[in-house]
Amino acid sequence: MPITPDTKDWTWVLERPCPECRFDAATFGAGDVARMIRENAHEWPRLLDRSDVAERPDDATWSPLEYAAHVRDVYRLFHARLRLMLDEVDPIFENWDQDATALAERYNEQDPATVAGELVAAGERIADEFESLAPEQWSRTGRRTDGAVFTVESFSKYLLHDVVHHVVDVSR
């Protein structure tokens, strides 16, 4: 059963703390990003080690397995977008419909152990990429089609909010 799509513009989390997950982008810098991504990625195998991993808590909320598959794909997508920001001048990111992807990829039918392994690998890959950046690369830019502009640094914080928030989502 599809979930009602979240259509909020979450870029506000770059300016103020998220009241739901307590993420505060102002409390860390670029040097913390790779470590924070790794910490997040390595939390997921434990979160998926439960008998009800594919059960939705209600009709409007993804299961822990669906959230994990989403986070895996977020890490993969953001890695591709990060490469665009590093390789091109002010690229525009293609739209991504996360809800359509969840349905098409049958997130809730995937093997939890496989998803956990792929999520950790994707997290490690993007963490390695952030860790390898030279100081001047953190100010490179990229844009969404809705006009939101990111630097690599704000992009990394936006990514971190998403994955941190989803740990809170499945821990409730």
Image (spheres, helix red, strand yellow):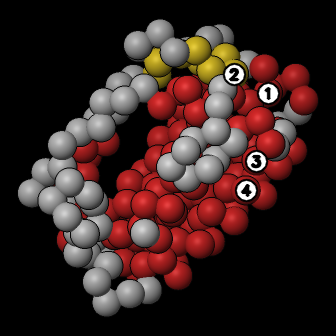
User: With respect to residue 23, does 88 lie above or below?
Assistant: above
Measure the C-alpha gap from mark 1 to mark 2.
7 Å
**Residue placed farthest to the left in the image?**
1
Mark 1, secondary structure of its residue: helix
Q: Which amino acid, mark 4?
A: Met
Q: CA distance from mark 3 to mark 1?
A: 11 Å
Q: Disc 1 vs disc 2: Cβ atoms closer than 8 Å?
A: yes
The residue identified by callout 2 is 151
Helix, strand or loop at mark 4: helix
> Residue 99: which quarter of the image?
top left
Badges 4 and 3: C-beta atoms under 8 Å apart? Answer: yes
Label 1: how many residues lie within 10 Å, few (<14), some (14-19) or many (20+)? some
Query: Which residue matches tag 3?
Result: 33
Q: Earlier in the sequence, mark 2 or mark 4?
A: 4
Q: Secondary structure at mark 3?
A: helix
Marks 4 and 1 sit apart, C-alpha to C-alpha, by 16 Å
**How many residues crowd around disc 3 within 10 Å: few (fewer than 14), some, or many (20 or more)?**
many
Tell which circle, 4 or 1, labels the residue nearer the N-terminal end.
4
The residue that label 1 is drawn on is: 138
Which residue is tagged 4? 36
Q: Amino acid at mark 2?
A: Thr
As measured in the structure, the alpha-carbon distance from the residue carrying label 2 to the one carrying label 3 is 14 Å
Q: Of circles 3 and 1, which is in front?
A: 3
Along the polypeptide, which appears first: circle 3 or circle 1?
3
**Disc 4 packing (10 Å; few <14; some 14–19; many ≥20):** some
Q: Does residue 91 appear in the picture of this structure?
A: yes
145 with respect to 5 (left or right): right
Residue at x-position 50% and y-position 49%? 20
Mark 4 → mark 3, Cα distance in angstroms: 5 Å
Q: Secondary structure at mark 2?
A: strand
Q: Which mark is residue 11?
A: none
Residue 111 image offset from top left, x and y in percent: 31, 77
